[in-house]
Image (cartoon, grey):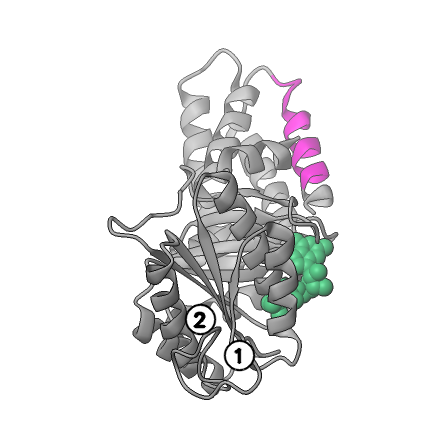
């Protein structure tokens, strides 16, 4: 991801290096190049506009101040603004004062929620937590089994409805077909067994639809999560903004997890989502293995893009 954007930005900024001072025309030409590079990378237009306006203002200021090395100043400004659109500071999970901390995952089918549940569980375990995974994706035929598989790999128990269970509170699970009941029972289970974090996997559809949103909103209302993480496939390009908007309006979320950052898409989703939704990116997923996962650091991502 980001290879061509990174190449173009680096080349554009390199062109400035030979210049002692930057004229307003130099700044304009550089901004034009950056604008094109961002648009080609599928970054949302409003985000590109704001970004360029900020760079222009600050780069021209740098020129007026007759700094020692104006080209380096522009590079610094671009870097800082890139860190800014990626969220600035690293935002950590907000743990509840009274456990369990409840983390709900939402997103389209195929975004990588179930895989992420396993990654998050493993990561939480590594941080000394005692997570419980709760399987509320009862839509996709294999989702519960898949969550059990990733849970086992992560060494984290999975609370799931078992075939035949019909009422909340049954030994291993609750309310087959009723994700809200399963979610509620999962939280009770976590309290009873003293898990300090609960990760709730929910169903997704291929496209955004009313029923999906309602179900996610019902689960949210039933369990009052401390964090709702919107899981976004970074490969979906321009659709990312509309999808994020739909989830923001339908369910609301407190943070974003970007998945498939290892893909070869152009990366615009990753660069747009923070600015468009106003919510921070908390984690990044970069592959199918449980280890391909980390806390999202805006500065590191910006440095990677600028080469
Ligand atoms: P869900 O429908 O949202 O639960 O999505 P899944 O967790 O089932 O993931 C859908 C597909 O994407 C699976 O084949 C995963 O192995 C794959 N996947 C998930 N996260 C990543 C990632 O970060 N990188 C890559 N390359 N594949 C991923």
Label 2 sits on residue: 247
Residue pictured at 64% horizontal, 20% vertical: 17
Contact (Cβ within 8 Å) of mark 2 with mark 1: yes
Q: Is residue 228 above or below residue 48?
A: below
Nearer-the-camera pick, 279 or 295: 295
Identify the residue shown where x is 58% and y is 51%.
155
Q: Which of 76 and 100 lies nearest the eye of the viewer?
A: 100
Number of residues whose C-alpha sits closer than 10 Å to that of mark 1, classed few (under 14), some (14–19) or many (20 or more) = some
Above or below: residue 167 compared with residue 224: below
Report the residue that reaches farthest toward the front.
171
Tell me the distance, in whole angstroms, between the alpha carbons under discs 2 and 1.
8 Å
Q: Position of residue 105 (x, y in %)?
A: 47, 64
Quarter, ligand 1: bottom right
Q: Is residue 137 left or right of residue 100?
A: right
Residue at position x 49%, y 11% in the image = 68
- Residue 72 seen anywhere in this rendered image of the structure: yes
* Front residue of 282 and 264: 282
Which residue lies under the disc numbered 1? 208
Inspect the magenta stretch and tell me whether residue 9 lies in it. Answer: yes
Q: Quadrant of residue 141?
A: bottom right
Read off the magenta span: 6-19
Which secondary structure type mostly characterizes the magenta part of the structure?
helix
Q: How many numbered circles does the render carry?
A: 2
Vertical arrangement, residue 281 with respect to residue 158, above or below = above
Classed neighbour count for the residue bearing mark 2: other residues with Cα under 10 Å, few (<14), some (14–19), many (≥20): many
Which type of secondary structure does the marked residue at label 2 adopt?
Answer: helix
């Amino acid at each position: 991801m980001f290879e061509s954007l990174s190449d173009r930005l680096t080349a554009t900024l390199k062109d400035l290096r030979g210049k002692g001072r930057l004229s307003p025309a130099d700044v304009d030409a550089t901004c034009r190049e950056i604008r094109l590079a961002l648009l080609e990378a599928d970054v949302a237009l409003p985000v590109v506009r704001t970004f360029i306006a900020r760079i222009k203002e600050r780069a021209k200021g740098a020129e007026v101040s007759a700094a020692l090395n104006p080209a380096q100043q522009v590079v610094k400004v671009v870097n800082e603004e890139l860190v800014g659109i990626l969220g600035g500071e690293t935002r950590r999970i907000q743990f509840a004062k009274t456990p369990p901390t409840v983390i709900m995952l939402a997103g389209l089918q195929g975004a990588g929620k179930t895989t992420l549940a396993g990654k998050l569980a493993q990561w939480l375990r590594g941080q000394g937590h005692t997570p419980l995974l709760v399987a509320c994706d009862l839509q996709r035929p294999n989702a519960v089994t898949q969550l059990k598989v990733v849970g086992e790999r992560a060494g984290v128990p999975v609370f799931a409805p078992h075939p035949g269970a019909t009422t909340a509170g049954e030994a291993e699970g609750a309310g087959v077909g009723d994700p809200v009941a399963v979610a509620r029972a999962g939280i009770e289970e976590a309290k009873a067994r003293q898990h300090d974090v609960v990760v709730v996997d929910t169903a997704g559809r291929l496209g955004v639809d009313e029923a999906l949103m309602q179900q996610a909103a019902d689960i949210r209302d039933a369990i009052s999560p401390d964090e709702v993480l919107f899981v976004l496939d970074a490969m979906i390009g321009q659709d990312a903004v509309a999808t994020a908007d739909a989830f923001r309006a339908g369910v609301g979320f407190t943070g974003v997890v970007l998945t498939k950052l290892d893909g070869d898409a152009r990366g615009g989703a990753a660069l747009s989502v923070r600015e468009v939704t106003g919510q921070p990116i908390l984690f990044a997923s970069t592959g199918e293995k449980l280890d391909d996962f980390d806390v999202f650091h805006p500065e590191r991502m910006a440095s990677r893009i600028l080469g």
